[in-house]
Image (cartoon, rainbow, N blue to C red):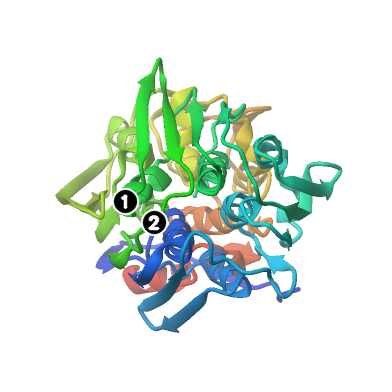
């Protein structure tokens, strides 16, 4: 077990700065996986420093992929669609749901058996959501209680399927589409609610035949199997909007603050948080937006704001901002109005039970908050009080409550602060550099 780190956060007078963030976690995982099964070399710049994304690289190395790691540059020699080799040992996804779920799609396509597992949190998270479709495609998967890691995946000889995931999940969609690359024929995923589309964007970048059609509120995404994929070549990963979210909210709720975050991904399947914060009166400017490798990027400027309004979030919006709900809840404590979130039960099966973690920690900081099975309700503004916070070994909880500490009375102690490195190892260093 890594040691538990306690970080103390004191109130800030202001936040000022302009900076870049490491690459988007979701895009980084995908770039490494597509580079591994593409033909040729990929040179990934601004690849995420997140521990999760290092787990993906470690797993791919165990599957025979040659990876060069230099500061600021990951070089991957693509093995091609038939080039993955049987692993010498058990693959370790660490804390990363994206690694285990998406890589399982690739492993389902291999004519050998692979065992993949992860840390305690990963071993509690539901895997049936990928086991079901991958089994329908012909893979044999053993799992504890049919649902939990370790997973033992015997693959190969897959058949294409048409599949409608019962949960809105980009990891499930991506797992099935990745498996589809190894199946004969056309594999289709029907999404009732759209989720982040980085896999589809990257499939296009790799020259894959992919079809996307609108169906009622969602989409039908098809990919043809057994086709060669181009490597990504020189590819710069856009800065991580989900990491930027902590700094954006920090700037909005801290007095006399202005932060500029450069070259951040603004794929519309990820920007609902920005829309919601703007709806609350958040002063956020999206500047110099451009397209890079099929993904939108921009500079984001956020300034101290008076937040107001009554906001009700549910339905299709939830998948778009699911990772940002912990920091949105912190913002809501400063809202002149009410934030109500429903139909977000997925939060209970993230790195921690995030509804519990948010409610417990906000209550410790003196906030009145209602907890629902599938969401929460906060009426603001309320004064935050410094308290002893538990990260529950969850990176987004550690970072969200460090931001809360910036405007709390007294000192906030984040126990298990090291969890931040799962997505942004530089978080506390950046925070110290921009505060006064
Ligand atoms: C991710 C999808 C989401 C998100 C996670 C990353 C991805 O998970 O919460 O942080 O990269 O596809 P689900 O697919 O479980 O919703």
Residue 407: % across, % down: 43, 54
Q: Which residue is mark 2?
A: 229
Q: Secondary structure at mark 1?
A: loop
Q: Counting other residues with Cα less than 10 Å from the Cα at mark 2, is it few (<14), some (14-19), or many (20 or more)?
A: many
Q: Which residue is mark 1?
A: 207
Quadrant assignment, res 28? bottom left
Residue 134: % across, % down: 66, 41
Determine if residue 384 is in view: no
Residue 194: % across, % down: 43, 30
101 and 14: which is toward the camera: 101
Mark 2 vs 1, N-terminal side: 1
Q: Secondary structure at mark 2?
A: loop
231 and 119: which is toward the camera: 231
47 and 14: which is toward the camera: 47
Q: Is residue 113 left or right of residue 250?
A: right
Judge whether 380 appears above or below 17 on screen.
above
Judge whether 193 appears above or below 273 on screen.
above
């Amino acid at each position: 077990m890594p040691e538990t780190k306690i970080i103390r956060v004191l109130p800030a007078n202001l936040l000022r700065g302009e900076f870049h963030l490491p690459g988007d976690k979701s895009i980084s995982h995908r770039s490494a996986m597509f580079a591994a099964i593409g033909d040729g070399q990929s040179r990934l710049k601004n690849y995420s420093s997140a521990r999760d994304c290092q787990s993906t690289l470690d797993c791919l190395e165990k599957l025979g992929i040659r990876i060069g790691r230099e500061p600021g540059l990951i070089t991957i020699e693509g093995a091609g669609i038939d080039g993955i080799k049987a692993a010498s040992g058990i693959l370790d996804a660490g804390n990363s749901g994206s690694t285990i779920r998406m890589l399982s799609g690739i492993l389902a396509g291999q004519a050998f058996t692979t065992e993949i597992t992860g840390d305690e949190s990963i071993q509690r998270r539901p895997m049936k959501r990928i086991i079901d479709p991958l089994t329908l495609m012909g893979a044999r998967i053993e799992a504890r209680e049919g649902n939990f890691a370790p997973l033992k995946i015997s693959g190969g000889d897959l058949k294409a399927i048409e599949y409608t995931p019962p949960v809105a999940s980009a990891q499930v969609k991506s797992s099935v589409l990745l498996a589809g690359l190894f199946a004969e024929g056309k594999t289709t995923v029907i999404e009732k609610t759209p989720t982040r589309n980085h896999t589809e964007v990257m499939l296009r970048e790799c020259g894959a035949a992919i079809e996307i059609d609108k169906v009622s509120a969602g989409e039908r995404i098809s990919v043809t199997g057994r086709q060669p994929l181009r490597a990504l070549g020189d590819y710069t990963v856009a800065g991580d909007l989900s990491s930027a979210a902590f700094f954006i909210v920090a700037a909005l709720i801290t007095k006399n603050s202005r932060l500029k975050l450069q070259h951040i991904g603004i794929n519309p399947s990820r920007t609902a948080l920005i829309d919601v914060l703007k709806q609350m009166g958040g002063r956020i400017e999206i500047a110099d937006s451009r397209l890079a490798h099929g993904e939108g990027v921009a500079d984001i400027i956020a300034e101290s704001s008076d937040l107001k309004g009554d906001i009700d979030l549910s339905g299709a919006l939830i998948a778009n901002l699911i990772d940002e709900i912990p920091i949105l809840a912190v913002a809501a404590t400063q809202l002149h109005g009410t934030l109500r979130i429903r139909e977000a039960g997925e939060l209970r099966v993230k790195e921690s039970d995030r509804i519990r973690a948010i409610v417990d920690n906000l209550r410790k900081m003196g906030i009145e908050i209602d907890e629902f099975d599938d969401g929460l309700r906060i009426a603001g503004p309320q004064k935050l009080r410094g308290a002893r916070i538990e990260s529950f070994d969850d990176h987004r909880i550690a970072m969200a409550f460090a931001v809360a500490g910036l405007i709390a009375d007294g000192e906030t102690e984040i126990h298990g602060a090291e969890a931040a490195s799962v997505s942004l190892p530089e978080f506390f260093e950046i925070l110290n550099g921009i505060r006064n």
